[in-house]
Amino acid sequence: MLSDPRLQQALVALAQPIAEFRAIIDDAISQADAFITAQHASAPQRAEHAAVSLGHFADGRIDAAGFAARFPPVAAASPSAIAALEQALRVFRDVRERGDDIFVVDVPPGRRLGVELDHALATIGSVFGAVVLAEVVRGGRYTPEHARLLQSREFRSWNKTERRFAPPLVVLVNGADLQSGAIMDFVDGREKIVLVVCGASPPAPLARCITPGTFVLQTVDGSGLDRMAAFNGPAVAAIVPTGAAVFMHDPLGGKDPWQRMTINFIPVTPKKSIGGQSIWQMSEDLQVIAELAATPFSIPALGNGSAAPAAGAADAAEKIAAWLVGQAGLQDGAA
Amino acid sequence: MPTMTSMKSVGTAAPAAPKELSLHEHTLEIVSDAGEGAQKCGQVFGAVSAKMGNGVWTVEIIPAEIQPPARVPEGASGFRIRIGDGPITNWGDATNLVVAFNEQVLLARHRVDALANDAVLLVEDRWATHDDPEIRTAWEHGMDELSGKDYRIIPVPMEELCLTLVDDPKKGKNMFVLGMLACIYARDVSRIQEQIAQTFRKKSVEVYERNVALMQLGWDWADEHIDFRIHVPVQVIDRELVVMNGNEALGLGAIASGMELCAMYPITPATSVSHYLSEVFEKFGGMVHQAEDEIAAVGVAIGASYAGKVAFTITSGPGLALKTEFLGLAVMTETPLVLVNVQRGGPSTGLPTKVEQSDLLAALFASPGDAPHVVMAPATIEECFHVMITARRIAEAFRTVVMVLSDTNLATGVTPFPRPKPDARWQAEPLDLSPVPEGQKPYAWDPETGLSRRVIPGRPGGMFTLTGLSHDEGSKVAYSSGIHQKSSAMRSRKLAVLSSLLEPPTPYGEEKGDLLIVGWGSTKGAIEEAVDRARADGMKVSALHLRFLSPLEPGLKTIFKRFKKVITVEINYSDEIGDPHITEENRRRGQLAMLLRAATLVDVDCWTRVPGEPLRPGAILGAIRGRMPRRGAQ
């Protein structure tokens, strides 16, 4: 499954949030390295540090060596604190060296999606603990109890800031194992999850992920992933097999559900269950997205007898216009 | 009564082959009624020119009122762009080409002597045949007034043509003009399209396409009807550049320096810093707090800083006046604070949208009582970025207030400069949150330096009462005169320590000569250009531009003594000898001149103006000529 081209497509779409998460790690490494180096810095090194910290406006205007002598850059840390900081550095570097793999979760068939997601985020989330540990050491507050900050931490214990900087995930999962309830535990902050769905899939597995502030996307060809990645909030997408529903719920679309929903395709309900999903459950999922997309306007049948289906904001205006034209008797070239 | 055809104008006949003018530099303006988009047009033109490799300096022309009436000279709103084949550091002297949306806004520029005698004026021509006879009469009077100079007037049917694409030409003329200028100056169309896309990034694709079509319409018209082209060579860009105005640079600098909070109250011309920050600050972990007034804004910043956050506040002159009591609190409690003052014309509401450097003394002596603090002034838009890093570092190191004096010229001017390469060491060091050693006091002043270690609330063993009352090392309210004497000395001594770390400034030009021009803030480019011209004429003139105004940069007296005469050039008011009642004794001098005379006991003269616009290098050159010591004078 890792050779699935849709995996690369998802990683490319998530390049920006991935880069942002890496920037956190890079900055943390740079600050921790600088702190350790400064512990044993010579006078010229301290002057160089002071010159940089004062910025270019001070170039040639402030005596950096004199400034360094007057204001030592960091307080001396204990050997145990330095050792803890070095452990934090190892966490940063481990995550950094794993490249894109750290953002990919391959869910073995039959395994619970939620457990795999939890495990993956807890592993990456150790970075947040390491950041806190580094700050504790740099702030002179380190005690041996702080060492436990390096233990893996489940998503449920992440604070608001950590959830805002949550790493994105690309998840390879069998359609039969795709339970939307398992995903909802992780929909917060700016977490982005892209599910690459293999095999038979329920038609609208993400229907129940839709909440007013969550970007939800089902796509066959990957279109819409760029908008999902740019969304400043939690987002879930699934690249589904052909035949599944294709829709987008963009919270920026408007206040009402129909303004936020765009449906490109709604299939008929499958004739047999898929995975743990019964026919009734799948039918309900399809009904949910159809009802969310329904405009608040009652659009009566047009003159030719065809009903105007409500299918989201994209064509609502046209439908209303067509209805008005029909009501005014202006269709078919009537003056 | 002169008419368009009887004046020195061209018709709209198609030129056979446009005349190519290759120039080192050229200055153009776009002026309109407020809301017609002249500034947006100018911003795009300036940004594209900078990205193509021209030196650029822009100045916004902003009316004094937010919604002035249409078609009145006082309502002129526009954009002036000076482009060159090398770096451009100021707005220059006269404008060579103007595009005006009506004759009234053109008259506004003519009447302030902004236009070169041989300027080319491209003017919307619909007013000449307007239905309203009053408008036609105003047009004729305007043309009559303009005929006193050698302007070349070219009528342009802007509205008529724009109406072929849009219903409301008010929302299209600016892009038409952009296309016209792009043709005349051979601007890169793909870059213009990129810039239009950036400008209208929050609008629909249709809006973008309509604006591009209007731009193309303007290009096509100019291509067919304008008989000259202006070629200002571009330089090969061999390094990454950024193009921005001074307020954006201040905002970016705040982010780069690790600031976490911008507490402010809207005030022209400072507000756009917070507009910019409100779009991006949160991504970097910061926030903009718009308080209920100026006083609350500085109070929030001080409170946040006291609690350990890296905070700054930003304002303009009237806001500075309101913040002064709280500034005293920050000085007294030794709470680090960066205060940015983007100066405008004063006093009172004064000239909200115009440049002035009249807040220097208010900045230096901003608070009642003795409240020593640092005052710094960036001289370029690039320095607006870098000054924030230095200001933040000094504020924290010295536990004091650092005031940064920018001004409208820097705030709204746009110029390219090398892309800064952020360094993590620009950010604030981590707070020392370790337990406070027993016996350490919150103001454990080093008697030699006045410096003390900051105690952040929450540090074990660090509890103390913060007070604005005079206090001792333990922050206990002072009941003896000796304590106030000591604490005042400690606060003052920190500035002496900073002064001891400052390097003497280096004059621009020779180390000695007949005349030294001293300036500060945004006048640097104009002063140095004037000095270059004077030196080319054989005058022994140098310039010195100060960035630290409190404490003053060291060695000034020694530098001054190498010149026969020293004058300051400033955008603030001073009396002129020879004016009624003005004598050497009662003359009020430029603010920097007053400061330098007091600090050095050198007889520093001044040449200052308050025209509501940046100083022109030609005007400074005139002042230099008028103040050159006579030969043989000592």
Image (cartoon, helix red, strand yellow):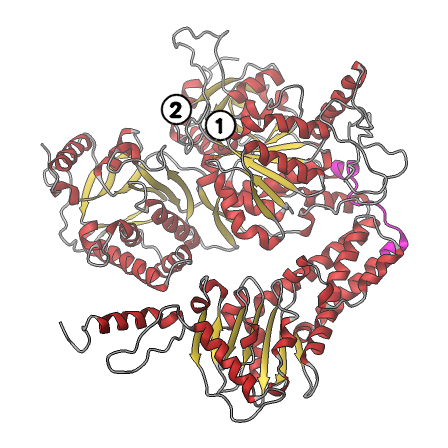
Mark 2 belongs to which subunit?
B
Q: Residue at x 67, y 28 (%)?
A: B329
Examine the structure image and report whether residue B215 is included in the region drawn in magenta: no
- Residue picked out by circle 2: B622
B133 w.r.t. B586: above or below: below
Q: Tell which tag, 2 or 1, sits nearer the viewer.
A: 1
Quick check: B84 left or right of B466?
Answer: left
Q: Residue at x 40, y 47 (%)?
A: B85
Q: Secondary structure at mark 2?
A: helix
Q: Are marks 2 and 1 on the same chain?
A: yes
Residue A9, percent from left and from top: 55, 78
Q: Which quadrant would residue A123 be assigned to in this image?
A: bottom right
The residue segment tinted magenta is A66-83
- Residue picked out by circle 1: B357
B563 w.r.t. B293: above or below: above
Quick check: B345 left or right of B320?
Answer: left
Examine the structure image and report whether residue A72 is included in the region drawn in magenta: yes
Hey, what amino acid is under mark 2? Gly
Q: Nearer the viewer, residue A333 or B313?
A: A333
Residue B618, percent from left and from top: 38, 29
Q: Which quadrant would residue B505 be assigned to in this image?
A: top right
B290 w.r.t. B187: above or below: above
Residue B198, percent from left and from top: 42, 57
Hey, what amino acid is under mark 1? Gln
Q: Residue at x 51, y 74 (%)?
A: A217
Q: Nearer the viewer, residue B613 or B153?
A: B613
